[in-house]
Image (cartoon, rainbow, N blue to C red):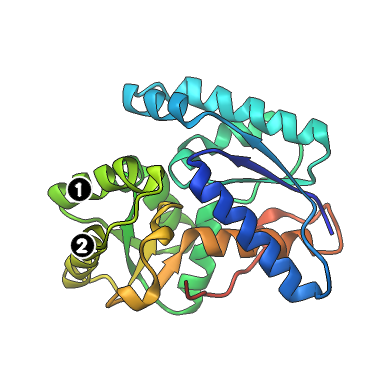
Amino acid sequence: MKTIGLIGGMSWQSSALYYRLINEETARRLGGYHNAPSLMSTVDFADVERLQHEGNWPRLGALLAEAARQLERAGADFIILCTNTMHKECEAIEGAVQIPFLHIVDAMAAAIKKAGQKRVGLLGTRFTMEDSFYSSRLRQGFEIEAVIPSAASRQLIHDMIYGELCQGLIRPESRREFQRVIREVADAGAEAVILGCTEIELLISESDSDLPVYASTTMHARAAVDFALQEHASMKADSVEVSPVKT
């Protein structure tokens, strides 16, 4: 089994979820006492959050590139980034290392396309919902259109992610707000919904949604195990196909 390199800390709550999901999936597939060989480079989310809201994306890209180099030097066979938003700077990671990088959008989009869904609600931080890096990859790579909530709903979700979920706060009233926003994107034509922030799964599961759910953390973790169990380390990361999951 190949060694998984994880860039974590954005936030540590979702990084802990990645670690658990990857090892549970490995044990499920291999049985016995098996878990996944892995390395994690953890950045300080206080620095990341500040730079995000200052708009200093070049500095953030440099931070991720250095984390990726650390993982490569330590012996990781490929890298995953344990956050949706920071995939905005995925090219910085890809340009810094020689080992493959497994993109979170690709881990979901193949399953969405296989299900025949063309319009999918996208919930995440304002950066993920409003910038083009996520929706463009869905559209250009997989012919999937992202349905984005209203400006007021985008701000509400953004504030709940940073003010609550990244702090480990789980509130029933916030779950109800997410459910309202899911109904909003359904009314706008979404056939399913992407939980496009790795912390959202701490609050929302498929049973909470009127739409089918594509849970980015769970699907990315499963894709990492798929790739780690492939026989040849030289295989391209984009060859991984992931099945839909329920949270």
Question: Foreground: 135 or 122?
Answer: 122
27 relative position to 204: left or right = right
**8 relative to 121, above or below:** above
* Mark 2 surroundings within 10 Å by alpha-carbon count, few (fewer than 14), some (14 through 19), many (20 or more): many
Q: Circle 1 is placed at which residue position?
A: 156
Residue 224: mark in rendering: none
| Residue type pointed to by label 1 | Leu
Comparing 143 with 210, the one in front is: 210
* Distance from the alpha carbon under mark 1 to that under mark 2: 10 Å
Camera-side residue of 243 and 159 = 159
Marked residue nearer the N-terminal end (1 or 2): 1
Label 1 environment density (alpha carbons within 10 Å; few <14, some 14–19, many ≥20): some
Is there a contact, CB below 8 Å, between mark 1 and mark 2?
yes
Residue in the image at 43% along x and 57% along y = 138
Q: Residue at image x 83%, y 39%?
A: 75
Drawn side of residue 70 relative to residue 146, left or right: right
Quarter of the rendering occupied by the N terminus = bottom right
Circle 2: residue type: Val
The local secondary structure at tag 2 comes to: helix
Q: Position of residue 137 (x, y in %)?
A: 45, 52
Residue 102, horizontal then vertical, whole percent: 63, 51
Which of the numbered marks, if any, corresponds to residue 181? 2
* Helix, strand or loop under label 1: helix
Q: Is residue 67 above or below residue 90?
A: above
The x, y position of residue 244, in whole percent, is 52, 75
Q: Is residue 124 above or below residue 206?
A: above
